[in-house]
Structures are given as C-alpha cells and as structure tokens.
Amino acid sequence: MSIQIQNVSRAFGTFQALKDISIDIESGELIALLGPSGSGKTTLLRILAGLEGLDEGAILFDGQNITNVSPKERGVGFVFQHYALFRHMTVFDNVAYGLKVRPRKTRPSKDEINKKVRDLLALVKLDNFADRYPAQLSGGQRQRVALARALAVEPKVLLLDEPFGALDAKVRKELRRWLRKLHNEFHVTSIFVTHDQEEALDVANRIIVMNNGKIEQVGTPEEVYEHPNSPFVYDFLGNVNLFRGRLHKGKLTQGQFEIDVPTYLDSHYEVVGYVRPHDIQIEKNQLNNESVAAKIVHIHMVGPVVQIELKREDVDEYLEAEIPKEHYKKLGIKNGDTVFIKPKQLKVFVPEDFSI
Amino acid sequence: MTKPLNVEHDSPSIAGHGATKSYAMQESMIVKWSLIAISLVFLALFLILPLVSIFVTALEKGWATYVASITDPDALAAIKLTLTVVLIVVPLNAIFGIVAAWAITKFSFKGKNVLITLIDLPFAVSPVIAGLVFILLFGAQGLFGEWLFQNDIKIVFALPGIVIATMFVTFPFVARELIPLMQMQGITEEEASISLGASGWKTFFLVTLPNIKWGLLYGLILCNARTIGEFGAVSVVSGHIRGMTNTMPLHIEILYNEYQFTAAFAVASLMSILAIITIIIKNFIEWKAKDE
C-alpha cells in the first residue's frame, strides 16, 4: 500500500515535534526514519498508526484520506520499541490476539487461527516457544513474537519503532538481516524508526533523515551517504572531518593549506569542508601545498581497515583517517610520526545552511 | 622469594575481613531477636489477647446461648443488612475505582492532581464528619431534604444513606491500589491491542483487567473489610432502628450498652471470623500475585 504524508504538523505544548512534513512512500518500500532523539521520527510513526493525533495535514493510504480513521480500523501492524507483549498471555495467545478479537463475521475459525499462528511462529523460529510467557523469553525472542503478532493481522503497512534498539549487537545484526529477508518475502510497505545510521544504511531501500521535526534528506542509502545535502546529514551519517577556511575562486584556503574545489567558484569568507575519514590520503612526504602536516596520535588496528587519529600541526584540530591495512603496512608509519594528509574528496557547505 | 611474601601479605587481610564480618553478624543477631521479641509481645498484647477474649466471652455461657444470640431476629437483620451493604458497595467501588484509576493513569488532563487529592480525602476526613455531611445534604433539614421528602425518597435513616456513607469511606481502597500499578504498567499494551484491531471494551477485558486483577482483588478485599466494619459514618446516618437500619457494628454497640455482653461478643466473634477470613484471602492473593 502506498502512503502519502501531506503537510503534517504536530506540537506538544510549546514543543513543535513535526513541522510541515510531506513524504510519498510507494507500495512495498522498506523505509528508515533516521534521526537523533527528539527529531520527531517516533511521533511521525505513531501518527501513521493513529496512536497520535496531528494538528495539521493529512495521511493518505492508497490515495484515501485516513487522517480521522481510528487506529483499530487502519490495518497497520505496529511493533513497539519495548515490544508491548501482553504479559499475561502465552506466545501463542499473543500472536493469535489480533485474529481472536475480530468481530464474529470476519473472525477466522479456531483451526484457521491455530494454523496461522503456528505458521507465523515457524517463520520467526519460535515453534517450540508457543506456551511460554513473554517474561520467559530473551529480548530477541520477544522482538520476534512482537513481529509475528503484528504480521498475524496481515497489515497493509508495518511500522516498527526502534525495532532493534534494546538488543545486543550480535542479535541486532541477525534480526536486521532477517527483517530484510522478511520484507523481500512479504512486500508489505514497512517503515522503521532508528537513530542508528548503520542500521538504516544496512536495511532500508530508502532513508528519510529527520532533524528538529523536519525532513533533512530523502534518498537511497547510497545517495544520503555519498551525497549528503546538508552538514547535518553529513555529520549524522558516519564520521566526518572538518576543514574550516576561506573560499576563493574554487579554492579552499586555510593558512598554508589550499585545496581545489572546482564546483564552488563564488567567494565566501568562512566555509567548512567536510571529508569522510576514508577520503583522507596519508603520505610520508609533502608533495605540494594541497597537503598538510599532522602528527599521528593513535592507531587503531582491528579489522581490515586501520583507523588513524591525527593532530594537525598548523591548527589545533584533530582528524580521523581510515586506510586499508595493506596500504598502512606499505607506509610503515607509527605513533608519533609526522605525516602529510590530503583530502581526496571534499564537500563544502557555506555558513547559511550551517546548522550543527 | 615472592611467593611466601604474597601469602603473608594476603592472609592477615582475609582473617581481618572474616573477623569484622562475624562481629557485625553477632551484633545484628542481637538486634534481630530483640526486635522480633518486641513485635511478638506487642502482637500478643494488643491483637491476639483481645481476639481470644472475644471468643472466650462469646462462649462464656455455653454454645446454646451463643447460637441463640446470633440467631436472634435483630442480629440476623443486622447481618443481612451488613451483607446487603457489602454487595452494593464493593461492586460499585470496584467500578468507580477502576474508572478513576484509568482516568488518572491513562490520560493526561488538567486538574489530575486535584482528582488524586480528592480520592485521598476520605482517608483524611473522620468518618463521623463524613456521616454528618450526608445528614446535612439529605436530612430533613438538609439541602435536598425538602425535595427528597416531597418525592418520597428516603436516604438518611435508611439503606441508601448507609450505602452512600460507606461508599464515601471506602472509596480510596480500590483506586489507591490500582493507580501505582497502572502507572507502572503504562499504556503500550493497550495501544498494541487497539492497533491489532481490538475495540475499547475488548482491550479492557482482555488486556487491562488481567494485568490489574491481583491489585484489584487486593483493593476489593480491603474495601470489603472496611465496609463490614465501618462504624462512625454509618452510625450517624443509620438512625439505629433495630431490625431495620442496624448494621453488625451498630448492633454490637447497642447490645453492649444494654449490658448483654455475651450476645454482643457473639456477634463480635462473627465479625472477627469474617476479618480472619479476609486476612487469609488477602495473604493468598499477595502470594499468588507474587508468584506471577
């Protein structure tokens, strides 16, 4: 089912949680709502489920305005952050709940309910846990029960609030992969809220980056990671190094240091260049004034990528670089060495849209 | 060379640690047993002794007298009236208690704190004053007295007055028990239920009620005990009409004032039995709730 969110605003007292949000979501998408806490992502999700009202705007499901439809009638599967399993019911009864509470006319027979619940429990690999109570399950198992319960009512939209937030790293990764697989099988339009950029990049087909109740950027994981449209998105999606300086005729200058930024031909007194750690090149000798001297402060060498922390010698600023282990070995550098660094790719933001 | 040195260094600290520990334990044992002894003596003097004396006095003149005093028509009428009041007050307080706790914990609205304070009011006000308030409202000279008289509705010196006064006094028990419980449980299970397509009623009966059942029962037990035993408020509004508006505590008082000690204690022993049963049920519920 497609979803249109049209000019939605919501305030809690004086706090404006959402400001004029509009998004079109196509049927079958797997969307991540990504943002820091307080960015309005959970509010937006709850508005879609009908658990929260909105002050202005409209929500359309398949072109139909459902803004005033009660959550009971929306046909939305909601997975709560802390699962909200019914604590006095077994796993089986939790999953069967949505089917059992249907009015008699639309309620499946007892056998049908049984079969459906068993199938779902098999899908979430909890066949042997049907008679357990939520308190007897681990976090990951509870999460899967919550998913099975939401899927039992065959929702047209699946909404997940921080679905992996309360789990440990390994279980989280497993469930992430599993959610994507599930989505590939069912093709139900799914939206999940997360504050973890890695999770969003890993799972979603499209990411909506939110900040302060507004949408910062919408795009595929590659788009938002490679081409952030604002300093906020740049900073929120991964580590970043800042190069402050002056922009003049396509060159960013800061003291001795000068880099070509041919896409910016206008002049600004003060701009900030953003560089991802893996876009920083390290050399032992200075080639030209496009590189700057820095001292190695710390080398972190776990995994195929070596993380190097550096302190610039011209200004009192720290930088982070990531280079492949092979390249690191070839360079033969160690803690305390002075090296020369050069940004391979740099994105410049002028102060007008500077918001962090 | 290092090894023995290590041992030497370690062992005194262990010994020292052990000594402090056992000394601390010794002291706490004395405190523990003296506290237990004080509690037991207190309980024996102020609770068990009076309770035993009730039964001793009640059976002083033999079993036949005991049975005669509790099967006396006035006594039976008092027992019946008390049970009638229980049957009306306890279910009504269950409903009002749930409604008030629900309103306070699941919604946010202005004046919530005022409502919480009002729920506590009966605990703060003396029952006698509560009774007097209802006399002032519904009595012959009261605010609604004339209107009630014209429409031939009897409230004070009749069952409705006793019910109203008892409800006032026992109102906080259920609500007070439920509010912290429901606050702790939050509303996400209810939200989950609604989003799964359940109606409000189904959500209440299938999700909310099972979650609060032990707390609710506990509140009801306390409410029940107080309803049976309420004296002050009921005394003011009842009018003490024998065989008509006398509840058990009022009946006991009348018998006692008439120097019918055996009969008074016989009815009192019945009430004591009800109290003991209540305590047993209460403990069972606590044990069961803990178990879940």
Image (cartoon, grey):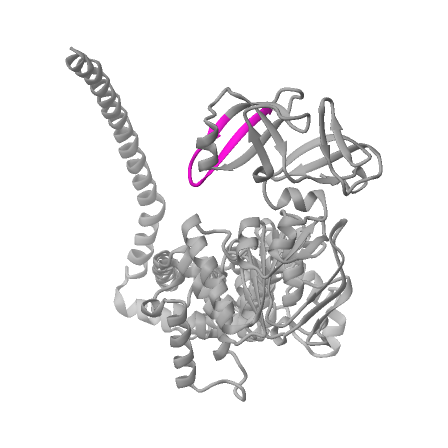
Which is nearer the eye, A228 or B44?
A228
Where residue A345 sits in the image (x, y, percent)? 65, 40
Magenta segment: does it hold B266? no
Where residue A132 sits in the image (x, y, percent)? 34, 65
Helix, strand or loop: magenta stretch: strand
Which is nearer the eye, B109 or A83?
A83
Image position of A303 (left or right of A311): left
- Residue A235, compared with residue A308, is above or below; it is below
Which is nearer the eye, A42 or A71?
A42
Magenta stretch: give its range: A298-311
Where residue B97 sits in the image (x, y, percent)? 56, 63
Residue that protrudes farthest toward the front in the picture: A287
Image position of A306 (left or right of B101): left
- Residue A327, compared with residue B169, is above or below; it is above
Residue pictured at 44% horizontal, 75% vertical:
A96
Q: Which quadrant: the C terminus of chain B?
A: bottom left
Q: Which quadrant: the N terminus of chain B?
A: top left
Which is nearer the eye, A230 or B247?
A230
Q: Is residue B74 visible?
A: no
Residue pictured at 22% horizontal, 23% vertical:
B18
Magenta segment: does it hold A310? yes
